[in-house]
Every structure is written in structure tokens, then in C-alpha cells.
Amino acid sequence: MFKKILVANRGEIAMRIIRACRELNIATAAIHSEADSTGIYVKKADEAHVVGPGPVKGFLDGQQIVNLALQIGADAIHPGYGFLSENAEFAELCQSSGITFIGPSPQAITLMGSKVRARELAERIGVPIVPGTKGGVSTFKQALAFAKEVGYPVIIKASAGGGGRGLRVVRSDEELRENMEVAAREAESAFGDGSVFIEKYVERPHHIEFQLLGDRHGTIIHLGERDCSIQRRHQKLIEIAPSLVLTQELREEMGNAAIAIARAVNYDNAGTVEFLLDQDGKFYFIEMNPRLQVEHTVTEQITAIDIVRNQIKSAAGLPLSIQQKDVILQGHAIQCRINAEDPKNNFLPCTGRVTAYLSPGGIGVRIDGAVYRDYTVPPYYDALLAKLTVRGRTWEETVSRMRRSLEEYVLRGIKTTIPFMEAIMQEPDFMAGRFDTSYIETHPELFNYDEVDQPEDLVLALSAAIAAYEGL
């Protein structure tokens, strides 16, 4: 087992990794910018080191991070998600420097990092894919020919994309012309790769992803699925597990397809295979994420399997201690992303100081976060502050528990998605399990929630009273 792991990330995911390492008796080293010097994860790690220059570049400087790992005696690096987690060159650099990259092989990252190559592989092994262009497109003429062949709507996608960036749904020749260049520019800015391809756009599908775990001894299993259909601008807001629409037969079929894709690239460690499920119950492969996902917590809650712990053990060369027959889905779980955003202002990111903070608790409630009172939300990073995950025996119990937890959540000083999530938990279609990827845009009334701006001293008094009561 490893002696020391350098955590090449920040915020809540760095905390998640540090906690797993602590349970495995592995020392941890955090990296941070000057802007993150007061971060909780910086204090919780066994040691912490400043990387730079600036608040972002240090997290993207693979050579600097590897040099630091060698200097401090770290024998492994966990990239979390984002930053260098899907960078095959970084994984290769770790490998060539004698440091274990906690993730899949550079070859698997390369194969799965391009959506075009991933689609080609899925098609080759017989997994259904959405009709799309053969490789990337570089001219409007090529794009138009495909759109005429399959009919509108179509979706423009960044070949190296993720997180909803570089995506544009178009419904006419004029929109196609306008958005081709925009999508390419956005892809170049976000991923350093401006290539795009085009797919037929599946209307109102469910976005279903399967969590995989693999070891270096040829074992690959899935831990069931997550429904990530509730999104804004193709970025996930709420994730649930298991899906409310999959039969056991369809779950097995999609799970086997996910494993077949992973096996085709000799995949090991944690990863996610994503599908679209249309209104007729047909599924289509869209991509594989060769890394840990933000929403892994909902899978952990219904399987009682620690995904990060298994990532670390797999990277150390240990075989998986669980087989497919050991994976039992129990109850339901929902994760809400608590973002520093203003939903009423097109989810505009917000910055500022957190003036009051108290997280919810009680049976079946889990918080993954790195925010606290007087924490200053910086403008440099993703808007995610915390992940609130709840579990219940039934769907109804889980929804009501999430609603209660959101009501308890005190986070003042900045706009957040908390009141918007509360509105969703009380909306009849969501409560009945009637939702797909069009849910947010087809329910504009969700944005009519009340913003209760309580006097600060009252909020602080209530927070103290609740904390005292729960401490009895």
C-alpha cells in the first residue's frame, strides 16, 4: 500500500480523498494556491504546499506537481476530477517518474478522452450509439450535409469535451451556421482542442450513467446506475440512484454494455459510462469518463461501497474485494449540488464571504463540502461549494428527507442553489418521478421561489440554537 499520496486537487473532492486516505492510514499532501491557503482541505492534510503561479495554473502544471511529489516522497498522486484527471500526458509523466497515477492507464485515458474515438470503439463492439458524423467536422458544408441526412435537431459537441462545455443544440440551418464556430471556440478555450462532431439530438431522454470499478487483474464490475437527467445547460444539478425508469432486465443489459466498453480498452480503476435512454426505452452510448465523478456519492449511499477507497487499493495493485454478485442496490439516494450560483440570473456564479453556515444532519444525510462561516468564495474555480446527499428506503422517503435537509441548510452571504433545490423537491412531477433532460426548461415556475433574507443576527442565533440542541 502507498505511504503518501499527493492530492492534486482542491475543495470538497480533496477532502473526500484525504478522508479515504486517513481510513487507510496513508499520509496525505495537499497542494493549494495562495487564494486557497485557508481551505479546510489544506488544514486536514498531513502537509500542504503552495503551487503557482496564480490561483489556477499551479493545478494544471503537471511537471511541477510531479517534481513536488518526488521531493516530498509521495509514491502516488490522486487527481480527483477536473484539472489533470483526464490528462493522458500527466498520467504518463507520473508513470515515467515512478509515481502511481490513481486512475486508469494513459492509454485508456487517450482512447476514452476523445468522444469521437470512444463512439467508434462502442460501435465496433456492438454497443448502440446515437447517429453522428464519422469523426470531427471542420466546415459548415460537412455539418449541413449531416443535418440534412438525419434531420433536425442535431447537437454540436466538442470532441474533447465534458461538463456541458462546447455543446450546442441547433434546430435550423441558420442556427447550425451560427453555432459551429461558437462551439469550436468554446471547446478550444476549455480543452485546448477546438475539434467538434455532430450527433442527432435525442429529444427528452434520460441521462443514465453506470459506475464502474476495475482492478489490474482483469476484474471489472458495475455498481448500478445514476440518473443525471436534471441539468441546466447540459451540466448536472441533481443526481439520483437507482434510476426510477430502468427495469432489472434493462439494468443488466446496460451494465453489461458499460463493462464491454471498459474491457475493450483494458480499463482499471473507477470510471463512468454514460448513455441516453430515449422515450421508447432504447439506449445509446455517448461517452466514458475515465475518472471519479462528482456524483459518486449517490452510488456509495445505495451500495455501501467506498469508491475512492477502491480506487486507491486498485492503483496499488490489489484485486477488488467485491464481485458483481456482491453489488446490491438498497433504497434510493439523491444528490443536490450546492453551487455558489444565482438560479434566477441564469445560474450566474457568485462570489463573496459566507456570513453564516450550518449544514443539515440526521439519519441518512451526508455532506461533502469544504465551506464554512467566513469562507470567501473565490472567482477562479468551479461554483460547487458542497454536495448534499440523502438516502431513504423508498423514493418518497428520500425526497422528503432531502426537502427537510435543504430547509435546515443555512448558508448566507452569497446566492446559492439551495432555494431552487427546495422548489424542485416540492414540485409534483419530480415527486412523482416524472422528469427527463428537459425538466428544468419545461418547469419555469421553479424559478419563482421565495428568497428569505433573514436578519443576520437571527440566522446566527438559530444556527447556534440548532447546534446546541443536536449536541444534547
Image: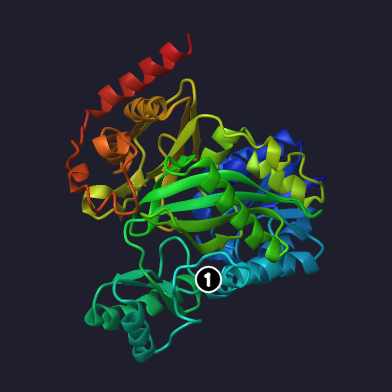
Against 170, is 242 above or below?
above
Looking at this view, name the residue that lies furthest to the top.
Answer: 472
Q: Is residue 230 above or below residue 398?
A: below
Q: Nearer the viewer, residue 411 or 300?
A: 300
The quadrant holding residue 52 is bottom right
> Is residue 155 among what the camera can see?
yes
On the image, the x and y values in percent for residue 239 come to 44, 44
Q: Mark 1 is on which residue type? A: Lys
Residue visible at 32% across and 27% down in the picture: 407
Q: Position of residue 395 (x, y in %)?
A: 41, 30
Count of labels in the image: 1
Please identify the quadrant where the N terminus is shown: top right
Using the rendered view, name the quadrant where residue 458 is placed: top left
Counting from the top left corner in percent of width and height, residue 471 is at 48, 13
Q: Position of residue 316 (x, y in %)?
A: 80, 50
Position of residue 401 in the picture relative to residue 262 (left or right): left
Q: Residues within 10 Å of mark 1 (few under 14, many from 20)?
A: many
Q: Is residue 437 above or below residue 169?
A: above
Of residues 101 and 104, the one drawn nearer to the viewer in this rendering: 104
Q: Nearer the viewer, residue 134 or 232?
A: 134
How is the structure coloured here? Answer: rainbow
* Left or right: residue 100 compared with residue 273: right
Residue positioned 33% across, 78% down in the render? 182
Relative to the observer, which residue lies in front, 291 or 395?
395
Q: To which residue does mark 1 refer?
A: 115
Residue 37 seen anywhere in this rendered image of the structure: no
267 lies left or right of 182: right
Label 1 element class: helix
Look at the picture and state if 327 lies above or below 280: above
Q: Residue at x 36, y 39 (%)?
A: 354
